[in-house]
Image: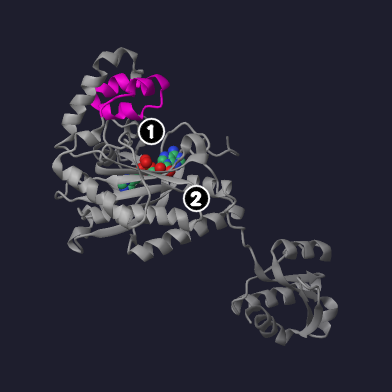
């Protein structure tokens, strides 16, 4: 127990941190390009926020939340997603007063008590976008473009973008009734989850992974045949803007998102080679959420990308960057008498801004050379008792093997010139 992390969590070790930094840099660059600013919210929130925001009949709320009572008897929950929390921060800090459209992004851990498997974890990381305050279909198109450009910038091919409209509180009840009519005489054959979904949230039946439910869903009515004029108009405009932007998409009238706040646009990006967990990004419009959380009725749209899934996809395509762990110098001290001089040199190299390291365990020359290689140092600086007598050190180029004796007082500047020129 003490030497194993909780199920569904993962350590990001030093040799893979570079991959995360790389992805995060692509996120920040693309968000700057599109004018989205970073927001960082706490990893836990009042449970009520997620009950109201995500919806009490969703799997996330019913089965997957990490909820606990703190010592002050408050019910808190580790965020299972970050849209509701971003909305909470937007309202708490009155960001709406600063601009009519707030374009925000975040990167962080989310927590869901899911059954762990490849691509599905209990702690996972999302990069997300929330555009709060815009009702124009162009905002939907912009964020979808951003999502696809992000994935393409990383080099991912074979992406499939599915698009749907899930309607609004005006047209969805009509569809809901049609769906219930359709499933009424199949109710006994549905799985227990879907039987309870029938009354509470029948659209979720369409998203059930059970083979029998899938079979029974064939021929079910499509939401896109029930949209009101406003939703239909919005949907048509999003499609034509995406076409103008050169973004290919498939219309999928069965696309139902797992969270209840969606209205109008819903989309998902899949990378099929990932198999069962192929959804790398998902999002849509949520025009009712801000009001549900206590604000004025304000339209909004966003998405989130699962970063572990992106890493898995990059790995499959051989696109993961090498871990570039290089350093400028490794100082090697030979003999006790050389330790202090070598340490002084190390400090001076660092003071000059050079990436330098040394061994503190008094190992052999051979072992220290090995460490210099492991640290990918460009130069080794060898300080022995004999060299100290001449106020010198040996500077060895680790790539060419060339070495020369350099006066200690000149060494830092010489190494700086070699490395930085
Ligand atoms: P979501 O579809 O629940 O949406 O999650 C978005 C992405 O997070 C998924 O497509 C997937 O890549 C990743 N993901 C979800 N669960 C896991 C898991 N257990 N392990 C690994 N990756 C996972 C949302 O979270 C919405 N907040 C997106 C959004 C933002 N909608 C509007 N704004």
Does residue 281 belong to the magenta stretch? Answer: no
Q: Position of residue 34 (x, y in %)?
A: 34, 63
The quadrant where ligand 1 appears is top left
Image quadrant occupied by the N terminus: top right
What residue sits right under mark 2 in the picture?
Answer: 157
**Would you say the beta carbon of the disc 1 residue lies within 8 angstroms of ligand 1?**
yes
Q: Is residue 314 above or below residue 173?
A: below
Q: Nearer the viewer, residue 98 or 382?
A: 98
Visible residue check, residue 80? no
**Would you say the beta carbon of the disc 2 residue lies within 8 angstroms of ligand 1?**
no
What residue sits right under mark 1 in the picture?
Answer: 64
Q: Position of residue 93 (x, y in %)?
A: 23, 57
Does residue 209 belong to the magenta stretch? Answer: yes
Q: Which residues are magenta?
A: 193-221
Check disc 1: other Cα within 10 Å, few if <14, some if 14-19, many if 20+.
some
- Magenta segment main secondary structure: helix
Image quadrant occupied by the C terminus: bottom right
């Amino acid at each position: 127990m003490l030497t194993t992390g909780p199920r569904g969590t993962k350590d990001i070790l030093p040799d893979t941190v570079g991959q995360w930094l790389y992805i995060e840099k692509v996120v920040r660059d693309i968000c700057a390009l599109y004018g989205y600013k970073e927001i960082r919210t706490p990893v836990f929130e009042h449970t009520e926020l997620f009950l109201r925001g995500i919806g009490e009949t969703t799997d996330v709320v019913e089965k997957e939340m990490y909820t606990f009572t703190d010592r002050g008897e408050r019910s808190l929950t580790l965020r299972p997603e970050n849209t509701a929390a971003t909305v909470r921060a937007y309202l708490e800090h009155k960001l709406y007063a600063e601009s009519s459209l707030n374009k925000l992004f975040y990167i962080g851990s989310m927590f869901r008590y899911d059954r762990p498997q490849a691509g599905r974890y209990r702690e996972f990381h999302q990069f997300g976008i929330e555009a709060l305050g815009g009702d124009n279909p162009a905002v939907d198109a912009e964020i979808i473009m951003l999502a696809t450009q992000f994935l393409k910038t990383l080099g991912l091919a074979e992406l499939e973008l599915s698009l749907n409209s899930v309607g609004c509180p005006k047209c969805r009840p009509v569809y809901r009734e049609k769906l219930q009519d359709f499933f009424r005489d199949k109710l006994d054959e549905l799985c227990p989850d879907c039987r309870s979904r029938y009354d509470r949230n029948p659209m979720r039946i369409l998203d059930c992974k059970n083979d029998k439910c899938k079979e029974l869903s064939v021929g079910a009515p499509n939401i896109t045949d029930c949209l009101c004029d406003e939703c239909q108009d919005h949907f048509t405009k999003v499609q034509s803007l995406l076409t103008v932007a050169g973004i290919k998409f498939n219309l999928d009238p069965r696309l139902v998102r797992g969270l209840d706040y969606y209205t109008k646009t819903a989309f998902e990006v899949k990378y099929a080679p990932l198999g069962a967990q192929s959804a790398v990004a998902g999002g849509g419009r949520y025009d009712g959420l801000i009001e549900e959380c206590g604000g004025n009725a304000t339209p909004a749209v966003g998405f989130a990308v699962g970063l572990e899934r992106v890493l898995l996809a990059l790995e499959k395509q051989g696109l993961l960057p090498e871990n570039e762990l290089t350093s400028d110098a490794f100082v090697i001290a030979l003999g006790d008498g050389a330790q202090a001089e070598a340490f002084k040199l190390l400090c001076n190299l660092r003071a000059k801004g050079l990436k330098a390291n040394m061994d503190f365990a008094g190992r052999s020359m051979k072992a220290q050379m090995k460490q210099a290689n492991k640290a990918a140092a460009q130069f080794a600086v060898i300080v022995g008792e004999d060299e100290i007598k001449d106020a010198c050190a040996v500077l060895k180029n680790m790539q060419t093997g060339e070495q020369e004796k350099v006066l200690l007082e000149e060494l830092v500047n010489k190494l700086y010139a070699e490395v930085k020129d």
